[in-house]
Amino acid sequence: MSDKYFIDTNILIYSFDETALEKQKVAQQIVQNALTNGSGVISSQVIQEFFNVAIRKFSSPMSLEDCSNYLHSVLIPLCQVFTSAKLYENTLNLMKTYNYTLYDSLIITAAIEANCTILYSEDLQHNQKIGKLKIINLFKEMTDLSARANALPKVSTKPRKA
């Protein structure tokens, strides 16, 4: 992973999700690589969204002390994009061109402003390119495989009658 990449909030959330272990493992690897080699970044918006979910929606909500520890050990070291008038102006322009929502556009704009070539997100259009930025859903293959498996005919476990 030599390209600079932006980590959307859902990746951070999956790094804590014990109900989706495959996604958790991938998400943890992305975050660890970002911290180790400095190639991954987030924005202040990602911090806000993460805390909102971690405190209110995790099955076992994070304590404020745990949030503080995570802030200092992971979020602050990764945060390189902060709210500015320029960020909002560029976001509005992106919304006009691509019809994304405000919050999705803020994430995309932050990734572009951080000079990222990859945006890791589960929520946006996989493989879409916006300038030099490519949106990648790391979990798409897992989801596609699961959907294909669920579409297979169900095999009966009952013994055949003779």
Image (spheres, rainbow, N blue to C red):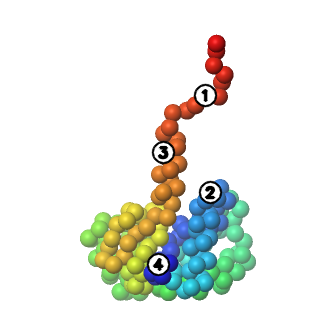
Q: Disc 3 to disc 2, how far (Cα)? A: 18 Å
Q: Inspect the image, locate mark 1, and give the three-letter code of the amino acid beneath it.
A: Ser
Residue at 38% from the left image edge and 81% from the top image edge: 112
Does the CB distance between marks 3 and 2 fall below 8 Å? no
Q: Quadrant of the C terminus?
A: top right
Question: Which quarter of the figure has residue 59?
Answer: bottom right
The answer to whether 109 appears left or right of 56 in the picture is left
* Tag 2: amino acid: Ala
Q: Residue at x 47, y 70 (%)?
A: 120
User: In the rendered image, which residue does mark 3 sit on?
Assistant: 148
- Give the number of the disc on residue 20: 2
Residue that numbered label 4 is attached to? 5
- Please report whichever mark, 4 or 1, sits nearer to the chain's N-terminal start: 4
Report the amino acid beneath label 3.
Answer: Arg
Q: Are marks 1 and 2 in contact (CB under 8 Å)?
A: no
Using the image, determine if residue 85 lies above or below residue 123. Answer: below
Q: Nearer the viewer, residue 144 or 91?
A: 144
For this view, does 25 lie left or right of residue 9? Answer: right
Q: Position of residue 7 (x, y in %)?
A: 50, 74
Query: Residue 33, position in %: x, y?
Result: 58, 79
The answer to whether the residues at label 4 and label 1 have Cβ atoms under 8 Å apart is no
Element type where label 4 sits in the image: strand
* In the foreground, 46 or 134: 134
Most extreme residue toward the left is 97
Label whose residue precedes the other's in the sequence (3 or 2): 2
Q: List x then y, in percent, for residue 139.
A: 51, 60
Q: Which mark is residue 156?
A: 1
